[in-house]
């Protein structure tokens, strides 16, 4: 099994599980607020999550054959399944054990908190996908030494402001991955650059 096959399989299995257990309508806590904000392109509670709201609005229009709440719930399912697929991909590349990576991704995707957020309209599902995307991009930057991956990682970190600042939990891992060269001399310039971007993004988000 190749890393890509492990990723596709993890994403497909998790998506099937999430769709089969998807909440059919509005759930408790923030879901109703996010659904209403997406429908009206309004502003939910701070920090606002504007990119998440716009993405929900577009997604619900694409899947207009579904009830609005069901459509927005499915967005969380797709995002979380995508996070699981990227997790399997990164683990397979780093451990060179695709089967173990697949098992790890499925186990992570089946955790209660992850599963719950994957079946309702909750920003943490999208934030999780963004966090794992940051780590996957940083891993590529460290492994290939190509600056385009470093730029992409910095861009994804910046997206945590309009999505949700919780995605910044991936920043320390990303800095470590872009600095490490797998036994070679550490790329301190790349690491310090991404650290600076992370601090700047956190500052902007706080403001």
Image (cartoon, rainbow, N blue to C red):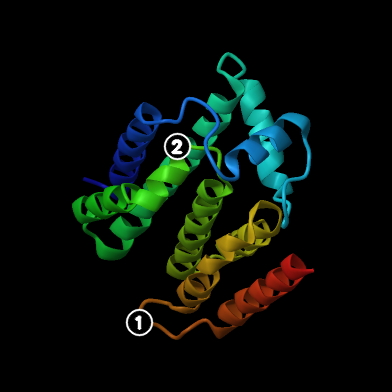
Residue in view at x 58 percent, y 13 percent: 65
Q: Can residue 19 be seen?
A: yes
Residue 190 position in % (x across, y down):
58, 77
Secondary structure beneath disc 2?
A: loop
Query: Which residue is more in the foreground, 50 or 140?
Result: 50
Residue in view at x 29 percent, y 56 percent: 92
Tag 1 residue? 183
Q: Can residue 82 be seen?
A: no
Residue 161 position in % (x across, y down):
70, 59
Q: Is 17 situated above or below 182?
A: above
The residues bearing labels 2 and 1 have C-alpha atoms spaced at a distance of: 41 Å
Callout 2: few (<14), some (14-19), or many (20+) C-alpha neighbours within 10 Å? Answer: many
Picture quadrant of residue 147: bottom right
- Mark nearest the camera among 2 and 1 is 2
Callout 1: few (<14), some (14-19), or many (20+) C-alpha neighbours within 10 Å? Answer: few
Residue most toward the top? 65
Whether residue 33 sits left or right of residue 115 in the image: it is right
User: In the image, which disc is placed on residue 198?
Assistant: none
Tag 2 residue? 119
């Amino acid at each position: 099994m190749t890393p890509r096959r492990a990723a596709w399989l993890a994403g497909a299995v998790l998506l099937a599980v999430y769709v089969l257990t998807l909440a059919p309508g509005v759930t408790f806590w923030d879901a109703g607020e996010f659904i209403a904000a997406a429908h009206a392109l309004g502003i939910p509670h701070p920090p606002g999550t504007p990119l998440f709201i716009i993405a929900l609005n577009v997604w619900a229009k694409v899947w207009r054959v579904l009830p609005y709440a069901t459509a927005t719930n499915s967005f969380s399912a797709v995002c979380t399944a995508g996070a699981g697929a990227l997790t399997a991909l990164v683990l397979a590349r780093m451990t060179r054990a695709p089967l173990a990576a697949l098992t790890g991704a499925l186990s992570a995707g089946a955790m209660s908190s992850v599963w719950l957020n994957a079946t309702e309209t909750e920003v943490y599902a999208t934030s999780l996908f963004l966090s794992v995307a940051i780590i996957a991009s940083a891993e590529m930057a460290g492994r290939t030494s190509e600056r385009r991956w470093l730029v992409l990682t910095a861009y994804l970190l910046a997206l945590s402001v309009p999505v949700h600042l919780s995605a910044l939990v991936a920043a320390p891992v990303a800095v470590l991955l872009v600095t490490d060269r797998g036994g070679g001399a550490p790329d301190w310039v790349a690491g310090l650059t991404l650290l600076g971007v992370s601090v700047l993004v956190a500052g902007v988000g706080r403001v």
